[in-house]
Amino acid sequence: MPHVRANEVHLFYVEHGHGEAVIFIPGLGGDHYLWHRQLPAFAAHFRAIAIDNRGAGQSDKPDVPYTIEQMADDVASLMDALGIERAHLVGASMGGFIAQMFALRYPHRLARLVLCCTSFGGPNVVPMPSESLAVFTDRTGDPEIDLRRLWAISVAERFLREHPEALEAYVAWRVAHPQPLYAYQRQLAAAMAFDLESRVHEIQAPVLITHGTEDRVVPLENARRLHARIPHSRLILFPEAGHLFFIERAEDFNRVVIAFLKGEEPSG
């Protein structure tokens, strides 16, 4: 399976298709499987690459402090290893933190930026509801129990009822590729320290901000605040969808983002 040595760790990635590179960055605890409903569609148009961040999936999980800056550098180092000079980035939640940081650290290497269910971090974000925060902070260490609790707050209630197969597939994958508790805590500490509110206006690349209207992890108002601070950004909302709206509304999301990355006018 494909690994590259990047920024002193081995990073796992999957790759499909040809053309301009699009790199998908998962969120806290997630791995490349988070993008399983995107990769086939994007591979028809782009060189679609999804990574496992350090500390998750099949990438290395060093038991040392992580930072969002470091994980942005991981992406740049992976690009070096794969011979990619410039890429589009699509980041979800903590992956959106990494993508924003990449945009500021490597502006010449970023083509277009898609931010999903994320925020600029820091004290002026709308916080996660307390019941959701408990799920993220009170881990049992049993991957199946923790994942079922996480899924229940990460998708809209209707999707949860109508698509139990999506939950079972997700749990099966993640149980087969578990994240040690220490690695989750290392990622969580990095995410909690993230704050780019005062700098996101510096992002020069075209930016599309996307969000589910029923997000119970990163409340919708965060997308509006991010949009207000990034000049010339676009905001597209996905009704009746939660934090994982790109799974719940995959066909709509794929259509909108592919159009944006091609330089066309996206519409929700």
Image (cartoon, rainbow, N blue to C red):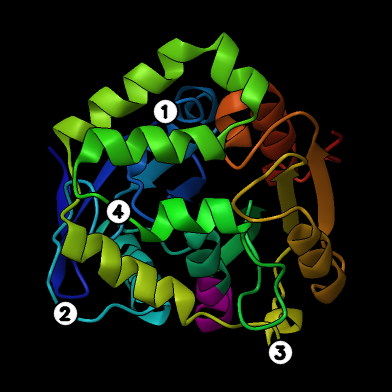
What span is colored magenta in the figure? 101-108
Q: Residue at x 63, y 25 (%)?
A: 157
How many angstroms separate mark 4 from mark 1 (CA)? 25 Å
The tag on residue 36 is: 1
Q: Is residue 133 part of the magenta span, yes or no?
A: no
Q: Amino acid at mark 4?
A: Arg
Q: In what quadrant of the picture does the C terminus appear?
A: top right
The tag on residue 64 is: 2
Secondary structure at badge 1 equals loop
How many angstroms separate mark 3 from mark 2 (CA)? 28 Å
Please name which of the two marks, 2 or 4, marks the residue nearer to the observer. 4
Secondary structure at badge 2 equals loop
Q: Position of residue 196 (x, y in %)?
A: 62, 82
Q: Amino acid at mark 2?
A: Val
**Which badge, 4 or 1, is on the more N-terminal residue?**
1
Tell whether label 4 touches label 2 (CB within 8 Å).
Answer: no
Please name which of the two marks, 3 or 2, marks the residue nearer to the observer. 2
Q: Nearer the viewer, residue 5 or 58?
A: 58
Q: Amino acid at mark 1?
A: His
Q: Position of residue 98 (x, y in %)?
A: 48, 68
In the image: residue 235, left or right of residue 96: right
Q: Nearer the viewer, residue 181 or 100?
A: 181
- Crowding near the residue tagged with mark 3, few <14, some 14–19, many ≥20 C-alpha atoms within 10 Å: few
The residue that mark 4 highlights is 139
How many angstroms separate mark 1 from mark 2 (CA)? 29 Å
Q: Nearer the viewer, residue 242 or 102?
A: 242
How many angstroms separate mark 2 from mark 4 (CA)? 20 Å
The residue that mark 3 highlights is 198
Q: What is the quadrant of residue 231 in the picture?
A: bottom right
